[in-house]
Amino acid sequence: FWNETSESWCNGHALAFSFFQGCPEIVVPDNPKPVITRACRYEPDVNPSFAQMAAHFDVVVIPARVRRPKDKAVVESAVGLATRWILAALHHQTFFSLTEANDAVQVLLAKLNSRPFKKMPGSRLSPFEEIDRPALKALPRDKYEFVQIQKASVHIADYHVEFDKCWYSVPFHYRGREVEVR
């Protein structure tokens, strides 16, 4: 993705679930602002758009604890390996679109996942096929579509809310109240 907006995070997770051909029970993101609006150990505030995406795929969002690097050491190590291995192979190439770059990364990712381990039998793909894939839930039937959700205050004088630089009228009995806009 070009950026790290809430839309990119939601669509990225949807594409990942599609790539894995299933959904996990729990998603454990770090605490980026597009996903977690207020970090808290017991009751974090999840961005409404991300919560809607999680509800669509029937997954629970439990963010990693703040300032606890040991909680995600294995994941960070795997991401670091993939990043170094793939970027080393691509660092002399020039791409003219994001799709072109993603296609090149996809080819190298397939190579990395099928590359044999040095000290164990198999590759990264074999434990996924044996352990992880059977544990994944089936994808929902309907396709995921991003929905931007935010709060807005209804103006007292004209019963309108502003969303995405446009004004929308609402029933008069909502004047002065905060509403959720989708």
Image (cartoon, grey):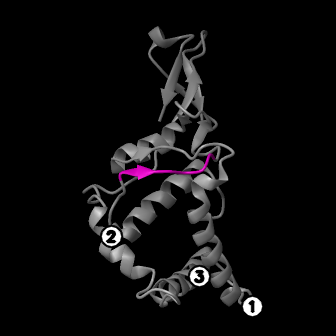
Q: Which span of residues is magenta-colored?
A: 25-31
Identify residue type, mark 2.
Ile
Q: Nearer the viewer, mark 2 or mark 1?
A: 2
Identify residue type, mark 3.
Glu
Distance of label 3 from label 2 (alpha carbons): 32 Å
Task: Tell me which residue sits at (48%, 83%) in the image.
Answer: 113
Distance of label 3 from label 1 (alpha carbons): 14 Å
Where residue 181 sits: x, y (%)? 50, 31
Q: Quadrant of the N terminus?
A: bottom right
The kind of secondary structure element at disc 2 is helix
Where residue 104 sits: x, y (%)? 57, 85
The circle on residue 67 is none
The residue where tag 1 is placed is 92
Residue at the outermost front position: 119
The kind of secondary structure element at disc 3 is helix
Disc 1 residue crowd, few under 14, some 14–19, many 20+, Cα 10 Å: few
The circle on residue 131 is 2
Q: Main secondary structure of the magenta part?
A: loop
Q: Nearer the viewer, residue 139 or 75?
A: 75
Judge whether 77 appears above or below 151 on screen: below
The residue where tag 3 is placed is 100
Residue at the outermost right position: 92
Judge whether 27 appears above or below 93 on screen: above
Identify residue type, mark 1.
His
Q: Quadrant of residue 122?
A: bottom left
